[in-house]
Image: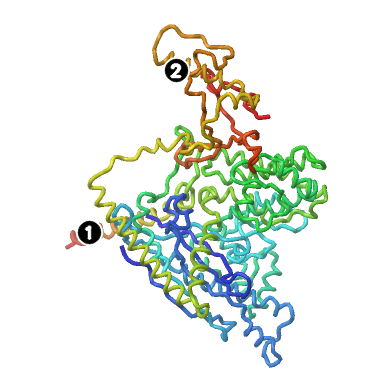
Amino acid sequence: MEGAPKWKAKEIVLDDAPEEPQILFYQDIEECCDHLQGNPSFSDTWDTGPKKVKYSGTETHIYHDPSTADLWWTYQVHIGCLHYCLFSQMADIWTFRKKLLRGQ
Amino acid sequence: MIQAVILASDETHLTNFSGSKVFHALYMTLGNIYGHIRRQPQSGAWVLLAILPSSSFTQTLLNLTSPQSYVKLNKNQAASLPGILKQCLYHECMAIVIDPLCYAKRRSCFVLGPGNKIHSSMACLVGYIADMKEQFMIACVTPRACPICLAQPRLHNSTIQDHCTAKPHTGSSTLDVLYRVRNAHPDVPIWKFRTLVSKEKCGVSGYVEHPFWEDLDVGPSHFICQDLLHGAHKFFWDHPCKWIASLIGTECLDRRISLLPKEGLHHFKSGISKLKQASGREHRDLLKYIAPALAGAPRVTPQFRDFILALLHIIMIIQLPMLDDNILGELDKHFEVMYANADEAISLGLRKNLWIPKLMALTHFCQDIQLGGVSSNWSSETPETLHKLLPKSLYGQTNHKDYHIPMLEMLTVHETKRVRHEYIQWRSSIQSSQHPNPPLDHTQNYGIKIAQRPHKQGVAITSLTAKSGSLAGLISAICKFSAEADATASTSTATHQVSGTYDLSSPWFPRRYNKLDLWWSYRLTIPPFNEFYERETRTIWCKTVEDHQKSKWKGYGSCVFVLAHPKRHGIHSMSATTLKGP
């Protein structure tokens, strides 16, 4: 488990207000996510993926935490497709190499 | 695995009575954490992600409006300029913070996660909690339009029902307008750009040319969440409550509310009009009182009553901890009733029109629930509480000058300490798990609990029964109870038919009940009836008036609905009228 994420500062100068630079203090959002994910106190109360909850034998959708709702599901489907594409590309490369080897 | 990022931003004042030190905080949490943990501000689930700068750009405005300036601003443009620059600054900052979540840039990487396992994780934005003012700023729409859908209120032949049927505001529809105007006028400065965009009459504000969600794969209509605290509770307090007060009169409403029996924690003893500093809890508790206070009140027409009841139904349903498609169907019916009777508020002369943004936004709660789960996930209550815990307490420890960096340093120290504390806890939990304890039986936590010491000790049973007529049946009930207990204990086949009334001389009356200990309240814990609900604890009061004629406390009781067992004797078999005090 690592320590807290580092703070960063950035000076922002708007094009229309060059005389008044502003300072933004921020943390890297990915580091913060990883920090929260690595916190062992949440390990028992953690949703790893989206789920669809229904009453047994019916098609009635139950909504509760964000993981039971639709937006997360769409994201996962999207990313699942992405992984799938990557794998199929890898398979293509693999067959391509095989073909090359055969050609030799 | 997806890390479901939830953002929340809000402005707060650091000083209490004077000064204009504004702190614009951006908080972050993950939707992966279970809701009941995430809603606790102290659980460590929330992180202060960024401090957004806020400035009123006085110097720039002075420079641009001075006589030596090379641009000429008219009065309107000069007035709107600080607002434009503020929004530009906000979007610029958010773009920097959000940058790793952009569709083109986000990558999955391997992160140590729960259960000591490595997960391939990717962060995606699922929600943004903001109040109405910020929702307009995020979606880049004018305050007259809606940040979620393309409905255009206030135009002729548009109604408040339009929001149900209008198309959602995809990000591209806003961006299209901005590109089109920019292409037509490439060299226009930002203060003229706004007026050009507003001439398009499509609800886009044109304050900002490049919104921060430009590169995300979700539009503002998906990630902006309706806020339960402001959108439902505060809305009801601010609008329908005021209508009711002006319809039936403030004193009448106060009197009616003060006469109602106490329900739950709060009781409005002197009505609501005298309340100073009403907080979210008062707003929420009022919803329980307003319907009985309205019943049979003068000047209330059936349509108006139906309108208020439909609103109450809607607000109660959207804050349920678990919802399903059937309940959402019911919600639609209540919306229909509400829209059908909404015009009554105009015909009673309470409002000139019904263009209230929060009233119109109520219908978007349905969409939010389907996209991101129940609305208690999206209440701004927790972020508002965080203001007190994080910025305000840290600011108090600084010397109030150039306070940003000392605050951040303190925050880092606190965070590191917390991480270390959690690590030690985790280590000790691992070591103790090698000698597993028997798991705690949670069912023991349910049932009835009374205080260790009785509220009144050793009261003679005769004095109780003599004082109040309603307790006259007590001796008979005890006799019946002991007779039954004897019958079951001795397992004799001959059952005694115990009926009629008894007095102290009866052989069935156990002598140890001559003196009784009294409790005036008990705590009832109701087990959760499915996994989506938490267990509920209620204190049930049953203080009668006669006991306290000398003390300053008045008697009061809670309303209890008892599902009586048809075959059991004892207190269950008595009807509510028998138990009622004089």
Q: CA distance from mark 2 to mark 1?
A: 88 Å
- Circle 1: element type: helix
Label 2 lies in what chain?
B
**Residue B503 vertical position relative to residue B159 in the rendered view, above or below:** above
Image location of residue B463, percent across then percent down: 60, 26
Classify 10 Å Cα crowding around label 2: few (below 14), some (14-19), many (20 and above): few
**Residue B73 vertical position relative to residue B580 in the rendered view, above or below:** below
Residue B123 visible at all: yes
In front: label 2 or label 1: 2
| In contact (CB < 8 Å): disc 2 and disc 1 | no
For residue B431, side relative to residue B372 (left or right): left
Q: Which residue is mark 2?
A: B485
- Circle 2: element type: helix
Instruction: Identify the residue at image location x=65%, y=49%.
Output: B164
Image disc number at residue B68: none
Quadrant assignment, res B549: top right
Instruction: Identify the residue at image location x=80%, y=55%.
Output: B352
Which amino acid, mark 1? Lys
Label 1 lies in what chain?
A
Can you name the residue that lies furthest to the left here? A104
Can you name the residue that lies furthest to the top here? B494
Q: Which residue is mark 1?
A: A99
Q: Nearer the viewer, residue B166 or B287?
A: B287
For residue B226, side relative to residue B453 (left or right): right
For residue B81, side relative to residue B353 (left or right): left
Residue B183 visible at all: no
Which amino acid, mark 2? Ala
Image location of residue B516, percent across then percent down: 52, 28
**Residue B353 vertical position relative to residue B469 in the rendered view, above or below:** below
Instruction: Identify the residue at image location x=50%, y=19%.
Output: B481
**Residue A26 vertical position relative to residue B554 in the rendered view, above or below:** below
Image location of residue B246, percent across then percent down: 79, 51
